[in-house]
Every structure is written in C-alpha cells, then in structure tokens.
Amino acid sequence: MLERSLRAQRGRGRKLLIPYLMGGMTEDWGQTLAAVVAAGADAVEVGIPFSDPMMDGPVIQEAALRSLERGTVPDEVLDGIARAEVTVPVTMMTYYNIVYRAGHKRMAHSLAEAGVSGAIIPDLSLEEVGPWAEEADAAGVATVLLVAPSSPEARVERICARARGFVYAVARMGVTGERADVGDEARPLVERIRRHTDMPVCVGVGVSTPGQAAEVCEVADGVVVGSALVRRLLEGAGPEGAAEFIGSLRRAID
C-alpha cells in the first residue's frame, strides 16, 4: 500500500509530505496523527519509543523519553494507529532491539494488523536486513531503507534493490534535528539514487521549515519532517498547532 499510494500521488504531480511524530508522547497523540493527515500529509511516520535512539537528536530523544515515562509500549502505539483510522499510509519507525524482542514474524504481522504499511529500522544494516525484510514482505509491510551521502555507489544500488515503499535520502550526515539550512548534499544524493530506482525518493533529516521543504522538493519526490514538528508538540502545540505547521509545509511544496 505504501509504495502504491506514494507512486499514485507522484503520478498526479503532487510532492510527497511525510511528517514524523512519536507515538505516545502526549495523551492526544492519536488526534495529532489524524490532524496532520487532514492538513495534507501523504503518509505519516510514527515512532515507537526506544531508550537509546541512536539516529535521533535531542528533540526526538526527549519525545521518546516522555513517551516511555508515560508507560508507552509498542502494542499501545500500534493500537493508537489502528484506532486513528487515518486515510493515508502509516510507516513505523523504531530500532531493531524492539523488533528482535518481538520476533520478526510477530512484529510484521502486528504492524499489518494495525494498518501499518511500512517500517523504518535505521540500525538494521543492509547486510542483516534479510530475515526481517522477508517476513515484512510476506505480511505486506514495506521495509524503507535509508541512503546516506557517504554511501558508495555500489551500496546505493544494493539498497535501492532491497528497499520497498520509498527510498529515504538522508540530507546530511548526523542525527535528526532542525538545521538552519538543508546543506548541499541532498541534491547529488537524490540524483545518485535515481540512477538505480524509479521508486519515490523522499529527503529527511534536518528539513525544518517550509522554505527548506520546497527547496528539497525541487529535486526529490517528497520530504520527511520530524524534529520541527515534534519540537512544537513538546512545547504544547497540540493537534491544532501540528495541523497549522503541516499545512504551511503543504502550501510551500505545492
């Protein structure tokens, strides 16, 4: 569902907008999920909190900590997604420890049963992704893979061959977080990825403002925005504030 939906939107000439939010970080996070969809998201990335989020900067770390302090467990996040009944694909983002402890098959089927159609597991390398990806494929869950600016050409080709849903182009080296500018690595990275796949390519990590989102979408099919949204939620913006921010991104990339 994830790749089919994103391809269909791209085929209509629409740039893809994928916000990220942390499951369980606030009591009303399910309402926030519905709000960002209503504001123009084409898919949503939902984090399952983990105590050692190695790819994430201080904003997402704080959101994970708040979620864990509220007692959030993976099944509660999936239940919240299922109850939200959103009309766009949802992709789960978490770390491999959680997947491993649940078991590949059980996790893949739990995601599918909750209506989740994609998974991002950033600490599961291409060399080790096979057992998980096979179970995910069987359950109808797309394994989204990341390509970094430092990835050699041969590795980019192999990542693109294994990726499902969309290819996540990491705009710059480093952890997630808001940046003053997008940097100069995104454009050549997207161009490199396009040499190996016609799958949708979305850029994330550091994209923080409507202007940056529009800049990225000049070359990419879409954009993933996380820390800038999550910071607003940590500051108490709530579903209404989240919708306002996502709406501003939607207008900019349109």
Image (cartoon, rainbow, N blue to C red):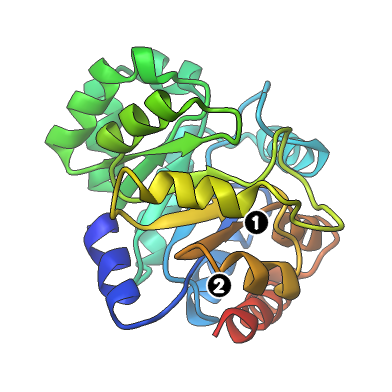
Q: Amino acid at mark 1?
A: Glu
Q: Amino acid at mark 2?
A: Val
Q: Which residue is mark 2?
A: 36
Residue at x 27%, y 56% (from the top left corner): 3
The tag on residue 27 is 1
| Residue 55 vs residue 28, the one in the foreground | 55
Classify mark 2: helix, strand or loop.
helix
In the drawing, does residue 132 fall left or right of residue 97? left
**Mark 2 vs mark 1: which is more N-terminal?**
1
Note whether 70 is above or below 182 in the view shown. Answer: above
Residue at x 65%, y 30% (from the top left corner): 55
Q: Quick one: label 2, few (<14), some, or many (20+) residues within 10 Å? A: many
Classify mark 1: helix, strand or loop.
loop
Residue at x 62%, y 51% (from the top left corner): 186
Asked if residue 30 shows in the view, the reply is no
Residue 163 appears in which quarter of the rendering?
A: top left
In the drawing, does residue 51 fall left or right of residue 84? right
In the drawing, does residue 240 fall left or right of residue 188? right
| Residue 157 vs residue 65, the one in the foreground | 157
Task: Indicate the quadrant containing the C terminus: top left, top right, bottom left or bottom right.
Answer: bottom right
